[in-house]
Image: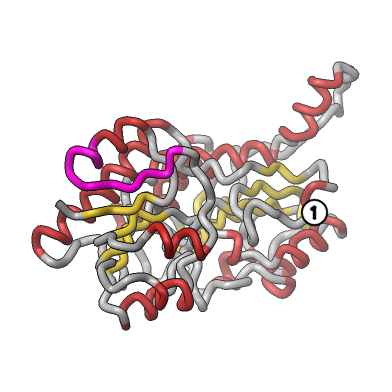
Amino acid sequence: MKKILVTRKLLDSNEEKLKKLYDVKLNSNDELYSQKKLIEMSQGCDGILSALTDKLDKETINLLPDSVKILSNFAVGFGNIDLEAAKKRNIIVTNTPEVLTDATAEIGILLILGACRRASEGIEGARAGDWKWSADYLIGKQLTGSRLGILGMGRIGQKIAKIAKSLGMIIHYHNRSKLNLEKEQGAIYHEKLESLLSVSDVLSVCCPASKETINLINKDSLELLPKGAVVTNVARGDIVDDEALIDALNRRKVYAVGLDVYKNEPNLNPGYLKHKSAFILPHLGSATKETRTAMANLAIDNISEFFQIGSCKNKVN
């Protein structure tokens, strides 16, 4: 029986499934393993079911025992893993695509609503009990008729577009390639990012993190937005230059932000905490029972597929 290291605690149903299939090393205390502990725990294992919180960089991968043949990441992203280092050691890396779409898109819409309608300030006022109605109390931005610019029109971007369209928003998008008419759902394609930014009353960042997209939303790109635009990010923190976005908030170039992802999570830039117009969440994109269960099941299935046929459809390296 193959031996699998599971680096973080999963939901009970997923761990029971693993126990039936493999000899598993579970993390019952949900400890965040140090590099040393992870290497120690991986001894004698054939595979690792990892999480985004595990930094599997080149150094760590090179220290893994030769027995490890697969890193099954419990996430759609895999920025925590050095893919090239894994490939050089003949270790396959897999992810969990498709199953996160609905839950993440729901958070994407929540970020748009929360930022546009000043939810953070509203929650603060309601809890303090010191709010008084007036005609101009916490007036926000209405979504109806606003232009939503979606940066990255993959599955999540398309789902956000569908929901936002039902709320009366006009959808624009920039993508590596133009979608077919069925997937576009009437959205307006912009070949250049600069063109998209110029018409985005609300910008929703949905693209993957890569060498090309790191700090793609920076001082220069933010200046192209209409004054008073709203910026939301449901993708990855590395795509946004925090200092530039906070500066845009300070100058009121940007009206508000809605964020679920950050650089150096969970240690987000303290500049966001100072802004009442920052609607911030602790990376809840996939945090529903249904989605987390499906993610773990797919991560397990990826391992099973690999050991059965020597490859996996969700291989990313």
Q: Residue placed farthest to the bottom in the image?
A: 88
**Would residue 191 be seen by someone viewing this image from the given angle?**
no
Percent position of residue 135, x then y = 86, 23
Q: Nearer the viewer, residue 46 or 120?
A: 46
Q: Is residue 116 magenta?
A: no
Judge the density around disc 1: few (<14), some (14-19), many (≥20) Cα neighbours within 10 Å. few
Percent position of residue 203, x then y = 61, 55
Instruction: Residue at 69% x, 51% y: name it.
Output: 230
Left or right of residue 154: residue 112: right
Tag 1 secondary structure: helix
Q: Which residue is mark 1?
A: 270
Which quarter of the rendering shows the C terminus? bottom left
Instruction: Residue at 53% x, 51% y: name it.
Output: 32
Q: Residue placed farthest to the left in the image?
A: 309
Instruction: Residue at 20% x, 47% y: name it.
Output: 22
**Would residue 152 be seen by someone viewing this image from the given angle?**
yes
Left or right of residue 124: residue 100: left
Q: Nearer the viewer, residue 292 or 102?
A: 292
Q: Is residue 22 magenta?
A: yes
Q: Nearer the viewer, residue 104 or 8?
A: 8
Percent position of residue 40, x then y = 42, 62
Figure quadrant of residue 133: top right
Q: How is the image coloured?
A: secondary structure
Residue 315's place in the image compared with 147, above or below, is: below
Percent position of residue 207, x then y = 48, 62
Left or right of residue 12: residue 225: right
Q: Amino acid at mark 1?
A: Pro
Q: Magenta part of the protein: which range? A: 17-28
Residue 63's place in the image compared with 18, above or below, is: below
